Amino acid sequence: MTAHIIDGKTIAQQVRAEWKLRADALKARGITPGMAVIIVGNDPASKVYVANKVKACAELGLYSIHRELPADITEAQLLSEIEALNNDPKIHGILVQLPLPKHLDANQVIEAINPDKDVDGFHQKNVGALVTGETPFPSCTPYGVMVLLEKTGIAIEGRHAVIVGRSNIVGKPMALLLLHKNATVTICTSKTVDLAKHTRDADILVAAVGRANFITGDMVKPGATVIDVGINRNSDGKLVGDVDFASVKEVAGYLTPVPGGVGPMTIAMLVANTVRAAERLSGFGKQIG
Protein backbone atom coordinates (compact mmCIF):
# COMPACT_ATOMS: atom_id res chain seq x y z
CA MET A 1 0.00 0.00 0.00
CA THR A 2 1.17 3.50 -0.80
CA ALA A 3 -0.60 6.37 0.89
CA HIS A 4 -2.59 9.01 -0.94
CA ILE A 5 -0.67 12.24 -0.33
CA ILE A 6 -2.99 15.04 0.77
CA ASP A 7 -2.12 18.21 -1.13
CA GLY A 8 -2.48 20.97 1.43
CA LYS A 9 -1.43 23.66 -1.01
CA THR A 10 -4.25 22.92 -3.44
CA ILE A 11 -6.88 22.62 -0.72
CA ALA A 12 -5.67 25.85 0.89
CA GLN A 13 -6.13 27.62 -2.44
CA GLN A 14 -9.70 26.34 -2.61
CA VAL A 15 -10.37 27.58 0.94
CA ARG A 16 -8.91 30.99 0.19
CA ALA A 17 -11.12 31.28 -2.88
CA GLU A 18 -14.21 30.48 -0.79
CA TRP A 19 -13.34 33.09 1.82
CA LYS A 20 -12.43 35.66 -0.81
CA LEU A 21 -16.08 35.60 -1.86
CA ARG A 22 -17.09 36.50 1.68
CA ALA A 23 -14.40 39.18 1.86
CA ASP A 24 -15.59 40.63 -1.45
CA ALA A 25 -19.16 40.73 -0.12
CA LEU A 26 -17.95 42.83 2.80
CA LYS A 27 -15.91 45.10 0.54
CA ALA A 28 -19.02 45.70 -1.55
CA ARG A 29 -20.53 47.15 1.62
CA GLY A 30 -17.51 49.38 2.19
CA ILE A 31 -15.75 47.15 4.72
CA THR A 32 -12.29 45.75 4.00
CA PRO A 33 -11.27 43.00 6.45
CA GLY A 34 -8.05 44.01 8.16
CA MET A 35 -5.40 42.03 10.01
CA ALA A 36 -2.52 43.25 12.16
CA VAL A 37 0.49 41.10 12.97
CA ILE A 38 2.95 41.99 15.71
CA ILE A 39 6.43 40.47 15.73
CA VAL A 40 8.85 41.08 18.58
CA GLY A 41 12.55 40.61 17.90
CA ASN A 42 14.45 39.31 14.89
CA ASP A 43 13.79 35.59 14.82
CA PRO A 44 14.26 34.54 11.15
CA ALA A 45 11.60 31.82 11.24
CA SER A 46 9.06 34.20 12.77
CA LYS A 47 9.78 36.75 10.06
CA VAL A 48 9.09 34.13 7.38
CA TYR A 49 5.79 33.18 9.02
CA VAL A 50 4.72 36.83 9.28
CA ALA A 51 5.64 37.52 5.65
CA ASN A 52 3.53 34.54 4.54
CA LYS A 53 0.55 35.78 6.55
CA VAL A 54 0.78 39.29 5.14
CA LYS A 55 1.15 37.86 1.62
CA ALA A 56 -1.98 35.75 2.07
CA CYS A 57 -3.96 38.83 3.07
CA ALA A 58 -2.70 40.76 0.05
CA GLU A 59 -3.69 37.95 -2.31
CA LEU A 60 -7.28 38.13 -1.05
CA GLY A 61 -7.39 41.91 -1.13
CA LEU A 62 -7.43 42.25 2.64
CA TYR A 63 -5.91 45.17 4.50
CA SER A 64 -2.95 44.20 6.64
CA ILE A 65 -0.23 45.80 8.70
CA HIS A 66 2.65 44.31 10.59
CA ARG A 67 4.53 45.88 13.43
CA GLU A 68 8.14 44.85 13.98
CA LEU A 69 9.04 45.71 17.56
CA PRO A 70 12.47 45.49 19.21
CA ALA A 71 13.33 42.42 21.28
CA ASP A 72 13.89 44.54 24.38
CA ILE A 73 10.45 46.19 24.30
CA THR A 74 8.81 46.35 27.71
CA GLU A 75 5.60 44.49 28.40
CA ALA A 76 3.81 47.79 29.04
CA GLN A 77 4.87 49.10 25.63
CA LEU A 78 3.72 45.93 23.89
CA LEU A 79 0.36 46.03 25.68
CA SER A 80 -0.02 49.65 24.58
CA GLU A 81 0.55 48.63 20.94
CA ILE A 82 -2.14 45.95 21.29
CA GLU A 83 -4.59 48.38 22.86
CA ALA A 84 -4.15 50.78 19.95
CA LEU A 85 -5.01 47.96 17.52
CA ASN A 86 -7.99 46.94 19.67
CA ASN A 87 -9.33 50.47 19.14
CA ASP A 88 -8.51 50.69 15.41
CA PRO A 89 -11.74 50.20 13.40
CA LYS A 90 -9.76 49.18 10.30
CA ILE A 91 -8.31 46.18 12.14
CA HIS A 92 -10.57 43.16 12.63
CA GLY A 93 -7.95 40.57 13.47
CA ILE A 94 -4.88 40.82 15.70
CA LEU A 95 -2.19 38.23 16.26
CA VAL A 96 1.10 38.34 18.09
CA GLN A 97 3.72 36.05 16.58
CA LEU A 98 4.96 33.48 19.09
CA PRO A 99 7.30 32.72 20.73
CA LEU A 100 7.97 36.00 22.51
CA PRO A 101 11.22 36.97 24.27
CA LYS A 102 11.42 35.38 27.71
CA HIS A 103 10.92 38.63 29.62
CA LEU A 104 7.41 38.97 28.18
CA ASP A 105 4.43 37.08 29.61
CA ALA A 106 2.80 35.47 26.57
CA ASN A 107 -0.42 34.71 28.43
CA GLN A 108 -0.85 38.29 29.54
CA VAL A 109 -0.12 39.53 26.02
CA ILE A 110 -2.70 37.19 24.47
CA GLU A 111 -5.30 38.14 27.06
CA ALA A 112 -4.79 41.81 26.16
CA ILE A 113 -6.14 41.18 22.65
CA ASN A 114 -9.83 41.95 22.21
CA PRO A 115 -11.35 38.43 22.02
CA ASP A 116 -13.51 39.63 19.10
CA LYS A 117 -10.25 40.26 17.21
CA ASP A 118 -8.39 37.17 18.43
CA VAL A 119 -8.06 35.42 15.06
CA ASP A 120 -5.44 33.00 16.41
CA GLY A 121 -8.08 31.66 18.80
CA PHE A 122 -5.72 31.77 21.81
CA HIS A 123 -7.67 34.11 24.13
CA GLN A 124 -9.16 32.30 27.13
CA LYS A 125 -12.65 33.39 26.12
CA ASN A 126 -12.30 31.73 22.73
CA VAL A 127 -10.56 28.65 24.13
CA GLY A 128 -13.42 28.27 26.61
CA ALA A 129 -16.00 28.67 23.87
CA LEU A 130 -14.24 25.91 21.92
CA VAL A 131 -15.16 23.48 24.70
CA THR A 132 -18.86 24.06 23.96
CA GLY A 133 -18.29 24.09 20.20
CA GLU A 134 -19.33 27.72 19.83
CA THR A 135 -16.06 29.58 19.34
CA PRO A 136 -16.03 31.86 16.28
CA PHE A 137 -12.24 31.50 16.07
CA PRO A 138 -10.94 27.93 16.21
CA SER A 139 -7.17 27.76 16.60
CA CYS A 140 -5.86 27.96 13.04
CA THR A 141 -3.77 24.79 12.77
CA PRO A 142 -6.38 22.37 14.20
CA TYR A 143 -9.04 24.22 12.20
CA GLY A 144 -6.96 23.67 9.09
CA VAL A 145 -6.62 19.96 9.86
CA MET A 146 -10.39 19.63 10.17
CA VAL A 147 -10.91 21.32 6.81
CA LEU A 148 -8.25 19.08 5.24
CA LEU A 149 -10.10 16.00 6.48
CA GLU A 150 -13.44 17.37 5.26
CA LYS A 151 -12.17 18.36 1.80
CA THR A 152 -10.40 15.02 1.37
CA GLY A 153 -13.55 13.11 2.28
CA ILE A 154 -12.12 11.45 5.37
CA ALA A 155 -14.88 10.17 7.66
CA ILE A 156 -14.56 11.38 11.26
CA GLU A 157 -17.78 10.35 12.99
CA GLY A 158 -17.32 7.13 14.93
CA ARG A 159 -13.63 6.87 14.07
CA HIS A 160 -10.84 6.60 16.63
CA ALA A 161 -8.58 9.65 16.47
CA VAL A 162 -5.26 9.62 18.31
CA ILE A 163 -3.35 12.85 18.88
CA VAL A 164 0.30 12.77 19.87
CA GLY A 165 0.96 16.09 21.59
CA ARG A 166 -1.02 18.07 24.16
CA SER A 167 -0.10 21.69 23.44
CA ASN A 168 -2.60 24.50 23.88
CA ILE A 169 -2.01 25.53 20.27
CA VAL A 170 -2.57 22.16 18.55
CA GLY A 171 -3.13 19.08 20.69
CA LYS A 172 -5.89 20.18 23.05
CA PRO A 173 -7.99 22.19 20.54
CA MET A 174 -7.51 19.40 17.98
CA ALA A 175 -9.05 16.94 20.42
CA LEU A 176 -12.05 19.19 21.03
CA LEU A 177 -12.72 19.79 17.33
CA LEU A 178 -12.61 16.06 16.65
CA LEU A 179 -14.91 15.37 19.60
CA HIS A 180 -17.42 17.86 18.21
CA LYS A 181 -17.47 15.73 15.03
CA ASN A 182 -18.24 12.60 17.06
CA ALA A 183 -14.83 10.98 16.92
CA THR A 184 -13.52 8.88 19.78
CA VAL A 185 -10.39 10.76 20.86
CA THR A 186 -7.22 9.68 22.65
CA ILE A 187 -4.52 12.20 23.57
CA CYS A 188 -0.98 10.90 23.98
CA THR A 189 2.35 12.55 24.70
CA SER A 190 5.91 11.63 23.84
CA LYS A 191 6.09 10.03 27.31
CA THR A 192 2.99 7.84 26.97
CA VAL A 193 3.78 4.27 27.99
CA ASP A 194 3.65 1.93 24.98
CA LEU A 195 2.82 4.82 22.66
CA ALA A 196 2.88 2.61 19.55
CA LYS A 197 0.01 0.52 20.98
CA HIS A 198 -2.17 3.62 20.99
CA THR A 199 -1.07 4.97 17.62
CA ARG A 200 -1.67 1.59 15.94
CA ASP A 201 -5.29 1.80 17.11
CA ALA A 202 -5.86 5.11 15.32
CA ASP A 203 -8.05 5.52 12.27
CA ILE A 204 -6.90 9.14 12.26
CA LEU A 205 -3.45 9.89 13.70
CA VAL A 206 -2.39 13.49 14.30
CA ALA A 207 1.31 13.97 15.08
CA ALA A 208 2.04 17.24 16.89
CA VAL A 209 4.85 16.42 19.29
CA GLY A 210 7.68 18.51 17.81
CA ARG A 211 10.19 15.72 17.20
CA ALA A 212 11.57 14.98 13.76
CA ASN A 213 10.50 11.63 12.26
CA PHE A 214 9.04 10.54 15.62
CA ILE A 215 6.16 8.51 14.15
CA THR A 216 7.41 5.57 12.10
CA GLY A 217 5.65 3.10 9.84
CA ASP A 218 5.46 0.37 12.48
CA MET A 219 3.42 2.74 14.69
CA VAL A 220 0.63 3.17 12.14
CA LYS A 221 -2.45 1.09 11.43
CA PRO A 222 -2.61 0.01 7.75
CA GLY A 223 -4.90 2.36 5.86
CA ALA A 224 -5.00 5.02 8.59
CA THR A 225 -5.10 8.75 7.87
CA VAL A 226 -1.92 10.38 9.21
CA ILE A 227 -1.77 14.14 9.67
CA ASP A 228 1.71 15.56 10.29
CA VAL A 229 1.61 18.90 12.10
CA GLY A 230 5.32 18.96 12.98
CA ILE A 231 7.86 21.35 11.50
CA ASN A 232 11.46 20.44 12.34
CA ARG A 233 14.96 20.64 10.90
CA ASN A 234 16.87 17.38 10.71
CA SER A 235 20.64 17.03 11.07
CA ASP A 236 21.07 17.99 7.41
CA GLY A 237 19.04 21.16 7.85
CA LYS A 238 16.14 19.75 5.83
CA LEU A 239 12.57 20.65 6.80
CA VAL A 240 10.79 17.54 8.05
CA GLY A 241 7.72 16.71 10.08
CA ASP A 242 7.03 14.57 13.14
CA VAL A 243 6.26 11.65 10.82
CA ASP A 244 8.89 9.52 9.09
CA PHE A 245 7.43 10.09 5.65
CA ALA A 246 9.30 7.29 3.84
CA SER A 247 8.15 4.48 6.13
CA VAL A 248 4.67 5.77 6.93
CA LYS A 249 3.67 6.32 3.31
CA GLU A 250 3.99 2.55 2.76
CA VAL A 251 1.41 1.84 5.48
CA ALA A 252 -1.02 4.75 5.73
CA GLY A 253 -4.05 5.28 3.53
CA TYR A 254 -3.72 9.09 3.57
CA LEU A 255 -0.74 11.20 4.60
CA THR A 256 0.12 14.90 4.69
CA PRO A 257 3.61 15.95 3.58
CA VAL A 258 5.95 18.47 5.21
CA PRO A 259 6.14 21.01 3.73
CA GLY A 260 2.95 21.38 1.70
CA GLY A 261 0.45 19.74 4.02
CA VAL A 262 -0.90 21.38 7.15
CA GLY A 263 1.21 24.55 6.88
CA PRO A 264 -0.68 26.19 3.99
CA MET A 265 -3.95 25.37 5.72
CA THR A 266 -2.93 27.18 8.90
CA ILE A 267 -2.49 30.42 6.97
CA ALA A 268 -5.71 29.87 5.00
CA MET A 269 -7.67 29.49 8.23
CA LEU A 270 -6.07 32.62 9.67
CA VAL A 271 -7.46 34.51 6.68
CA ALA A 272 -10.82 32.81 7.23
CA ASN A 273 -10.88 33.87 10.87
CA THR A 274 -10.02 37.44 9.89
CA VAL A 275 -12.89 37.63 7.42
CA ARG A 276 -15.22 36.09 9.99
CA ALA A 277 -14.09 38.68 12.55
CA ALA A 278 -14.86 41.46 10.09
CA GLU A 279 -18.32 40.01 9.49
CA ARG A 280 -19.03 39.84 13.19
CA LEU A 281 -17.68 43.28 14.09
CA SER A 282 -19.47 44.95 11.19
CA GLY A 283 -22.77 43.19 11.81
CA PHE A 284 -22.85 41.83 8.26
CA GLY A 285 -22.73 38.26 7.07
CA LYS A 286 -22.60 35.10 9.12
CA GLN A 287 -22.01 35.28 12.84
CA ILE A 288 -20.49 31.83 13.20
CA GLY A 289 -19.57 29.51 10.38
Image (spheres, rainbow, N blue to C red):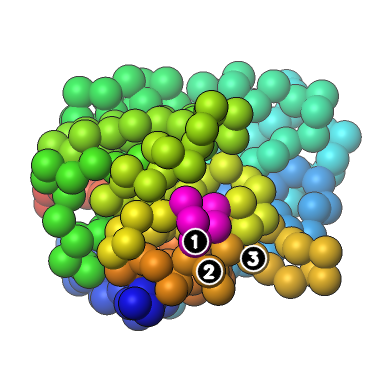
Reading the chain from its start, which is encountered first: label 2 or label 1?
1
Which residue does the numbered mark 3 point to in the structure image?
240
Residue at position x 63%, y 58% in the image:
213
Q: Position of residue 157 (x, y in %)?
A: 12, 45
Determine which residue is flagged by label 1. Answer: 217
Give the amino acid at mark 3.
Val
Q: Nearer the viewer, mark 2 or mark 3?
A: 2
Check if mark 2's residue and mark 3's residue have beta carbons within 8 Å.
no
Q: CA distance from mark 2 to mark 3?
A: 13 Å
Q: Amino acid at mark 2?
A: Ser
Compute the Cα span from label 2 to label 1.
5 Å
- x 32%, y 46%: residue: 202
Q: Is residue 121 left or right of residue 137?
A: right
Q: Is residue 20 magenta?
A: no
Number of residues whose C-alpha sits closer than 10 Å to that of mark 2, classed few (under 14), some (14–19) or many (20 or more):
some
Circle 2: element type: helix
Dot 1, how many residues are within 10 Å of its Cα: few (below 14), some (14-19), or many (20+)? some
Q: Which residues are magenta?
A: 215-219
Residue 148 left/right relative to 115 = left
Front-lying residue, 20 or 166: 166
Are discs 2 and 1 less than 8 Å apart at CB?
yes
Judging by the rendered image, the residue that carries numbered circle 2 is: 247
- Residue 4: x and y in percent read 33, 77
